Image (tube, helix red, strand yellow):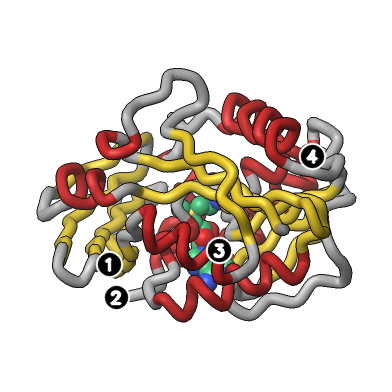
Amino acid sequence: MNVPLYAALWANYDKLNAETDYEEWADFLCVLFGRHSKIPVTSVLDLGCGTGSMTFALHSRGYDMTALDISPEMLSCAREKAEKQGIGDVLWLCQDMRSFELYGTVSAVVCCLDGINHLTGYRDLDRCLSLVHNYLEPGGLFVFDVNTPKKFREFYADHDYILEDEGVLCCWQNQYDDRHGICDFLLSVFEENQDGTWNRTDTLQRERCYSRKRLTQSLEKAGFSVEGIYTGFHMEAELDSAHRWYIAARRD
Ligand SMILES: C[S@@+](CC[C@H](N)C(=O)[O-])C[C@H]1O[C@@H](n2cnc3c(N)ncnc32)[C@H](O)[C@@H]1O
């Protein structure tokens, strides 16, 4: 059965993503807000929020949070987590980052864990950036990260991987077309049932590899200035040898 990626993964997303340290990442975002924003950051939009890990990390640091994702499954998981933690003041929106509408502006927008690579068409990227610009207060900051060309060429490439946690196994086969900058991830998710049998769900996910030049051009065209490109929270690697770029762009 072929279903959208996050419809297959949502129940196990946090388990499979357990190594990501959102607290450290949130601290890093706060540093970037302080360093690059021209206005005090009080309200944040978490674009492609998934199961809300970054939303909660920023909420606990005092920001007024709006969180948006296209996957109803990922959002319902986030809402359930919010309820369990007694967090009632996050605005959750099931919308597409290429065509979203907010009630008002925010002072910062974040998009974490390669959400921007999910925009596989250049026009999709332009639409998204234009909306982010529209809903950001002047002087406000957009911070996002992308998987780098090096990561697509060397780590994803045509390699296969297995992610495993209790009761779940995710087999992950990649096909990377370097000429077109498109990577297909063929995922088979196996989930163990209570009676010891396993369910299998197959899904296809596509990402686009963006160069720094393309991202910078698109950001500038949308009315942003690129204030910083980072390769990590602490130790800085060379941009060309990094697997992830964290980009801070300010709305002019
Ligand atoms: C890799 S996950 C990252 C989730 C979350 N930001 C995190 O750090 O765990 C990418 C998320 O982007 C969402 N997404 C992909 N395309 C989207 C779109 N066009 N509009 C809104 N959300 C989208 C997916 O549903 C998924 O939850």
Instruction: Give the mark toward the camera: 3 or 1.
Output: 3
238 on left or right of 136: left
Q: In which quadrant is the C terminus drawn?
A: bottom right
Look at label 2 and name its amino acid: Met
Q: Which residue is mark 3?
A: 220
Tell me residue 35's x, y (percent).
70, 32
Look at label 4 and name its amino acid: His
Instruction: Measure the alpha-carbon separation of dots 2 and 1.
Output: 6 Å
* For marks 3 and 1 on the same chain, the one whose residue lies earlier in the sequence: 1
Tell me residue 43's x, y (percent).
84, 49
Image point (44%, 60%), residue name: 215
11 on left or right of 99: left
Q: Nearer the viewer, residue 50 or 214?
A: 214
Eyeballing the image, is 14 above or below 152? above
Q: In which quadrant is the N terminus drawn?
A: bottom left
Q: Which residue is mark 4?
A: 59
Instruction: Measure the alpha-carbon separation of dots 4 and 2.
Output: 37 Å
* For marks 3 and 2 on the same chain, the one whose residue lies earlier in the sequence: 2
Q: Which residue is mark 2?
A: 1
